């Protein structure tokens, strides 16, 4: 006997499909909706398109997807078809009337973003981007933003283990020195998410201290005991804080970092970077974990900043702590990014020291995320060297920022400044790039410095004499002059 076909399931699917089509027609493009192409057909694009299609408040009307993978040519995401590849952008913009192209690739090389921006501008449209991982919790159409220079430098896929980080932060009393600075404030924000028993934020600048307090907790009050107004140069005050607050974990980010100024005033660098660090180390006693925030300038140092940072690495190793060394942080006060932005706002010219100068550049979020992971896997007496990406040609960074501004501005080369290298060095002489646990984190052993010999530094010595003494303290043991 012929079996009767059950059409109930097909009927339900048909009803849903008809309802969806009617909803889409009723929804229309909506007043003010901007026709948008999405570049990329991965997970980020899927989340974005779902928001664009089903959120009635979405400012965008998706008209197609571009993706370079031939296997995705016939795919649809949220009902929107893949209509071409990168090379088809001009044609598809013309055919669909798209006014914006939204870049939705999470881990992209700098060259791809720059090329797509050039193609988009040539086609008469505007390039927007989805946020990087960590910029927002859930990706929606309202999160799409303008291109920033950090996008044009490329995006780094940084994989870390939150469980390892939580293992030493959750339920612990954590102190961050230099909490008002670029690195210190981001440390506070990220540490706060791991639910420490107490987060203590220490800085000598009351304005930046209040700013980071509000960024961590917008409802915080000025009398909140989490904020500590203190200067690491004041040994007595630092000892009192450690005695009364008893932190378990310390991130020491307080430092002077403006290289040209420190060349002129090395005594100030010694007072804060060297003596300040020694004050904190001596007060820390038996904390569970001490993390010194260092810099790539500490590798084979040639500047006052580099010398003082290398000495802090050696002091930290002598006290059983670990250091984290990384390159330049984009957007921090005094960084090349903020300097270029100010020069562009003034109408130029943009000044670069040398056509061939390169630097390792990281966003603050990237640097701190890697730092927290490095502190979880590092051992006492080590420097953990962070590396995300390749060195960036600073002249190219200037050109990209000028291109974003849209005005034809000149670039003027001024020559390297005292104590400045043509290219950053991440590893010093004899240090080996050894990455046993994470592809972006190297482990190098650090020789100890005798705190007593460091205390003999005379901060009021002549700049030349003090700089020479700093260089001696950073020399390999076998090449040091006799005391």
Image (cartoon, helix red, strand yellow):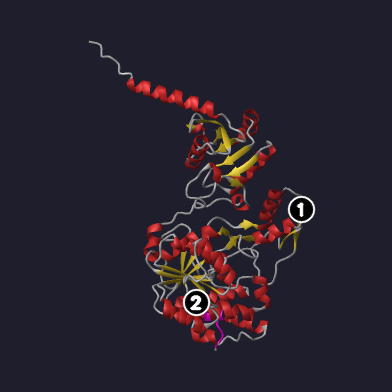
Label count reads 2
Q: Quadrant of residue 353?
A: bottom right
Disc 1 vs disc 2: Cβ atoms closer than 8 Å?
A: no
From the top left corner, tell me how far across and down residue 349 is, in percent: 76, 58
Does the stretch in magenta take in 346? Answer: no
From the top left corner, tell me how far across and down residue 341 is, in percent: 69, 57
User: Mark 2 falls on what kind of element?
Assistant: helix
Q: Residue furthest bottom?
A: 483
Disc 2 designates what residue? 314
Residue drawn at 71 percent across, 61 percent down: 354
Viewer-closest of 120 and 476: 120
Q: Which residues are magenta?
A: 473-482
In the rendered image, which quarter contains the N terminus? top left
Residue drawn at 68 percent across, 59 percent down: 356
Residue 48 visible to an observer of this rendering: yes
User: Mark 1 falls on what kind of element?
Assistant: loop
Residue 386 visible to an observer of this rendering: no
From the top left corner, tell me how far across and down residue 411 is, in percent: 75, 56
Label 1 neighbour load within 10 Å: few <14, some 14-19, many 20+? some
Q: Earlier in the sequence, mark 1 or mark 2?
A: 2
Above or below, 234 relative to 155 = below
Q: Nearer the viewer, mark 1 or mark 2?
A: 1
Give me the C-alpha separation between circle 1 and circle 2.
Answer: 44 Å
Disc 1 designates what residue? 409
From the top left corner, tell me how far across and down residue 371 is, in percent: 48, 63
């Amino acid at each position: 006997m012929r079996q009767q076909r059950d059409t109930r399931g097909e009927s339900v699917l048909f009803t849903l499909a008809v309802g969806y089509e009617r909803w889409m027609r009723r929804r229309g493009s909506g007043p003010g909706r901007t026709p948008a192409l999405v570049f990329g057909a991965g997970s980020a694009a899927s989340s974005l398109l779902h928001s664009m299609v089903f959120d009635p408040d979405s400012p965008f009307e998706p008209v197609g997807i571009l993706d370079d993978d031939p296997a995705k040519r016939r795919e649809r995401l949220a009902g929107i078809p893949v209509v071409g590849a990168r090379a088809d952008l001009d044609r598809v913009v013309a055919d669909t009337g798209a006014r914006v192209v939204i870049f939705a690739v999470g881990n992209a090389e700098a060259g791809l973003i720059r090329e797509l921006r050039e193609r988009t501008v040539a086609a008469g449209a505007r390039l927007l981007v989805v946020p990087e991982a960590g910029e927002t919790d859930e990706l929606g159409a309202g999160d799409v933003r303008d291109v920033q220079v950090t996008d044009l430098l490329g995006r780094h896929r940084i994989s870390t283990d939150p469980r390892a980080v939580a293992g030493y932060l959750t339920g612990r009393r954590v102190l961050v020195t230099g909490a008002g600075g670029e690195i210190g404030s981001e440390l506070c924000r990220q540490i706060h998410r791991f639910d420490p028993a107490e987060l203590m934020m220490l800085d000598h600048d009351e304005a930046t201290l209040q700013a980071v307090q509000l960024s961590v907790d917008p409802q915080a009050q000025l009398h909140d005991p989490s904020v500590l107004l203190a200067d690491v140069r004041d040994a007595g005050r630092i000892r009192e804080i450690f005695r009364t607050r008893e932190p378990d974990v310390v991130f020491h980010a307080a430092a002077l970092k403006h290289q040209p100024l420190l060349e002129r005033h090395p005594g100030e660098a010694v007072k804060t970077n060297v003596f300040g660090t020694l004050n904190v180390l001596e007060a820390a006693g038996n904390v569970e974990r001490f993390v010194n925030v260092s810099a790539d300038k500490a590798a084979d140092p040639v500047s006052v900043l580099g010398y003082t940072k290398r000495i802090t690495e050696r002091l930290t190793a002598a006290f059983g702590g670990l250091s984290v060394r990384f390159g330049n942080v984009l957007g921090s006060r005094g960084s090349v990014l903020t300097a270029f932005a100010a020069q562009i706002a003034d109408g130029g010219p943009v000044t670069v020291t040398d056509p061939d100068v390169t630097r390792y550049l990281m966003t603050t979020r990237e640097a701190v995320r890697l730092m927290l992971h490095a502190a979880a896997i590092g051992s006492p007496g080590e420097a953990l060297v962070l590396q995300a990406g390749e060195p960036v040609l600073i002249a190219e960074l200037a050109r990209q920022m000028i291109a974003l501004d849209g005005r034809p501005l000149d670039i003027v080369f001024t020559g390297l400044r005292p104590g400045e290298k043509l290219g950053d060095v991440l590893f010093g002489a004899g240090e080996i790039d050894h990455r046993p646990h994470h592809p972006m984190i190297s482990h190098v052993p650090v020789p100890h410095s005798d705190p007593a010999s460091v205390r003999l530094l005379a901060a009021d010595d002549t700049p030349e004499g003090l700089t020479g003494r700093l260089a001696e303290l950073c020399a390999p043991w076998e090449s040091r002059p006799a005391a």
